Image (spheres, rainbow, N blue to C red):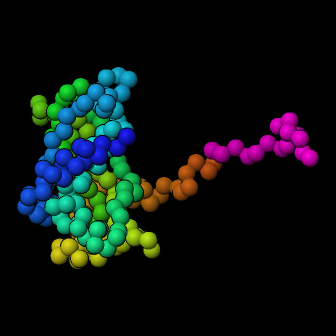
Amino acid sequence: MYPFLRLAKQQFLVRNAPPLATGETSVTRHICWPWDLDMFAELNNGRVLTLYDLGRMPIAKRSGLLALLKRERWGFAVAGATVRYRRRVKLFDRIEMRSRVIGWDPRFIYIEQGMWKRNGECASHAVFRTAVTSGAGMIAPERVMGLLGLETASPPLPLWVASWIEAEDHRPWPPMQEAVPAPLPLAATGEDAA
């Protein structure tokens, strides 16, 4: 189940926080609870992605994006991610999550996030490709930034992020078409042709 109570707690904690500009880092703190663990008694990699959700919402609130989404009846979706896992997070470990918007292109807003252990080691690092959406499709990030009263030109994206974006442009969609076997003839399946 999605951790709605944890999300509400994060939103409560930033209710009076100052506005956050593009590139500024939002810091949130989290604990690895028993229900976050996998069979190896460490933070489940799927739960890592969910916790990153909890780190993005304070950015959305502090930038004014949540209010804009509510006013316009728009949505906020993840369209892709690249994640690097480096250190295990164990039961009751405390982590500090650092999140920031690093730029955008004509379709997507890119958010960089990292989870840091108390000893100063980075446990995982991710970049999320996000989109503001409406019933008619995606809203251009330039328009979103303009409505938020922010600079509409994106800061330069780091080379490694630009390279990931370029690699994604070459990724086939729908995926795995070459891996789908041709259907067997009915006679070979033993099914009745009638």
Picture quadrant where residue 59 is located: bottom left
Residue 47 falls left or right of residue 63: right
Residue 174 x %, y %: 56, 55
Q: Quadrant of the N terminus?
A: top left
Q: Find the residue positioned furthest to the top.
A: 40
- Range of residues picked out in magenta: 179-194
Picture quadrant where residue 41 is located: top left
**Residue, x 66% and y 45% (percent of image)?**
180
Q: Find the residue positioned furthest to the right.
A: 194
Residue 107 x %, y %: 37, 68
**Residue, x 7% and y 61% (percent of image)?**
18
Residue 27 x %, y %: 13, 48
Compare residues 13 and 166 and report the one nearer the observer.
13
The relative height of residue 38 versus residue 67 in the rendered view (above or below) is above
Residue 72 falls left or right of residue 135: left
Residue 45 falls left or right of residue 11: right
Q: Main secondary structure of the magenta part?
A: loop
Magenta span has 183? yes
Compare residues 90 and 152 and report the one nearer the observer.
90
**Residue, x 85% and y 39% (percent of image)?**
191
Magenta span has 88? no
In this rendering, does residue 159 appear at all? no
The relative height of residue 73 versus residue 34 in the rendered view (above or below) is below
Compare residues 158 and 44 and report the one nearer the observer.
44
Total numbered labels: 0
Residue 8 x %, y %: 22, 49
In this rendering, does residue 111 appear at all? yes
**Residue, x 29% and y 68% (percent of image)?**
69
